[in-house]
Image (spheres, grey):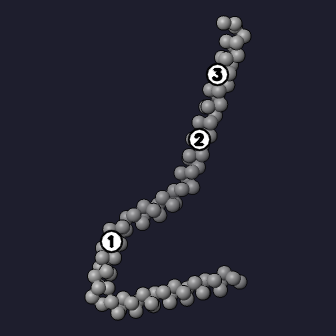
Amino acid sequence: MNKSGYHQRKLRKQQLLEEIQQQRQLIAAYSRNWLEVAQPYDKCWQTLVAFKPYVAIGSGLALLYGLRHPRQVYRWSRHIINMLGIIKIVRNTLYKN
């Protein structure tokens, strides 16, 4: 084995190790940045997940009420759909200007 080939391989190995170290540092910096950016969304998601049992209980009660009083639930659903339509029209009108 000649010395120049060994020396070139050793230099190449050192260059690759330095490149890997730089990539690891970049990944660490990007992951910290990602965690900072995603933190508000994580908090919102955790808040929503905390209300999961209450939503399950509330939907069950609404279903039972709907089975006992279908006309009122139908009327309420129409009112809610109409209100959402009005909100959409107002929002589109305000943002159009």
**Where does the C terminus fall, quadrant-wise?**
bottom right
- Residue 89 in percent (x, y) is at 60, 87
Report the side of 24 relative to 67 (left or right).
Answer: right
Distance Cα–Cα, label 3 vs label 1: 59 Å
Dot 1: what SS? helix
Q: Quadrant of residue 48?
A: bottom left
Nearest the viewer among 54 and 33 is 54
Question: Where is 10 relative to 28, above or below?
Answer: above
Q: Give neighbour class at mark 3: few <14, some 14-19, many 20+ (Cα, 10 Å).
A: few
Question: Where is 30 relative to 24, above or below?
Answer: below
- Residue 39 in percent (x, y) is at 51, 56
Q: Quadrant of residue 3?
A: top right
In the rendered structure, which disc, 2 or 1, sits on the residue that comes first in sequence?
Answer: 2
Q: Residue at x 30, y 90 (%)?
A: 69
Q: How many circles with numbers are drawn on the protein?
A: 3
Report the side of 66 relative to 20 (left or right).
Answer: left
Q: Residue at x 63, y 83 (%)?
A: 92
- Residue 76 in percent (x, y) is at 40, 89
Question: Where is 94 relative to 15, above or below?
Answer: below
Q: Residue at x 32, y 81 (%)?
A: 62
Distance Cα–Cα, label 2 vs label 1: 40 Å
Q: Which residue is mark 3?
A: 13
- Labels 2, 1: front one: 1
Q: Which residue is mark 1?
A: 56
Dot 3: what SS? helix
Amino acid type, label 2: Ile
In the rendered structure, which disc, 3 or 2, sits on the residue that comes first in sequence?
Answer: 3
- Labels 3, 2: front one: 3
Q: Which residue is mark 2?
A: 27
